[in-house]
Image: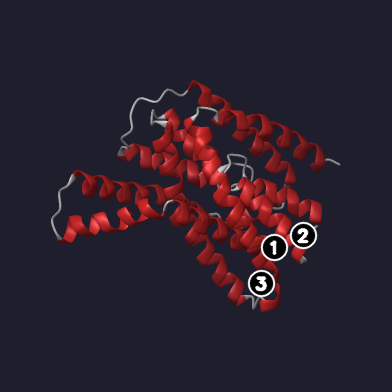
Amino acid sequence: MDILQSIILGLIQGLTEFLPISSSGHLVLGGALFGLESEDITFEVFLHFATFLAVFVFFFRQILKIIISPLRYVFRGSRSHEDLFWSKYLLLIVIGTIPAVIVGLLLKDQIEKAFSSVFLTGVMLLITTAVLFLTLLARPRRTELKLPDGILVGIAQAIAILPGISRSGSTISTAMFLGVDKKTAFNFSFLLSLPAIFGAFLLQLKEALDMSIEWGVISIYIPGMIVAFVSGYICLIILRRVVIAGKFAYFGIYTLIIAILAIIFSHA
């Protein structure tokens, strides 16, 4: 890999990580086009960390409330509506993260193998397409998140570990199917992503250090990370507007096209 490829893959990551079109699927396709080997999953994790930072900056105020409110609730006995709300939010994030942790730890080897299959990626993109189109039938009924919402959205996030299944597409859609309004679905989807993305980064970073990845290689990763962060932040702004405007399903047109191309490419 050279710096130009790092920048291109960083741009792919930033443009696709938050949009419901599967960043992992696009990285598999991009890797196949560039002839990158499966070991380059380490680079993918570095890119995920860059987009993790984009989410952290974008939701910084909410994250502070999620951290501070439970502390006030536990140590000061605060029972204000805001502290109760964000304390419950933290509980939902913890519950929603558990499925991804279980899947990531138990099926790690199988998941890594899946990243070498362009055909599987194409099939999973077709599933993402179907999920996105089905959101046209979703009807928002409430703004409040309930315990089952955290569990079911968390399961959707765990399934999205597969390349081609969009994380944001599956989690936002699941929340919408449950009757949650669009803005709440958007916020919960990305706040829920933070522990899973950061945990995956730490696990992969440990492997990278055990493999003695040279700093010269990491220096090639850095331009891609910067591009991923900037483009990812911009995409968060765009996606929030699209979701609230009720045009989320339109991304299904794009994923359908990419899915067909991926399946054709896998047989070429």
- The kind of residue tagged 3 is Ile
Compared across the picture, whether 165 is left or right of 149 comes to right
Foreground residue among 155 and 33: 33
Which residue in the structure is indicated by mark 1? 40
Residue 214 can be seen, yes or no: no
Mark number displayed over residue 218: 3
Check the image and report above or below for 200 versus 266.
below
Q: Are marks 2 and 3 in contact (CB under 8 Å)?
A: no
Position of residue 239 in the picture relative to residue 79 (left or right)? right
- Secondary element at image label 3: helix
Q: Residues within 10 Å of mark 2 (few under 14, many from 20)?
A: some
**How did the renderer colour the structure?**
secondary structure
User: Which part of the image, by quadrant, shows the C terminus?
Assistant: top right
Q: Residue at x 19, y 55 (%)?
A: 73
Quadrant position of the N terminus in the picture: bottom right
Label 2, label 3: how far apart the Cα atoms are: 16 Å
List the residue tagged with mark 2: 36
Where does the image place residue 179, in percent across and percent down from the top left?
39, 28
Q: Residue furthest left?
A: 77
Residue 209 x/y as whole percent: 59, 76
Q: Secondary structure at mark 2?
A: loop
Disc 2 vs disc 1: Cβ atoms closer than 8 Å?
Answer: yes
Residue at the extreme right of the image, as rendered: 268
Under mark 2, the amino acid is Leu
Which of the two discs, 2 and 3, sits closer to the camera? 3
SS at mark 1 in the image: helix
Which residue shows up at 49% across the image and 21% down it? 137
- The answer to which of marks 3 and 1 sits earlier in the sequence is 1
Q: Callout 3: few (<14), some (14-19), or many (20+) C-alpha neighbours within 10 Å?
A: few
**Which residue occupies 63% across, 47% down?**
15
Q: Position of residue 68 (x, y in %)?
A: 27, 58
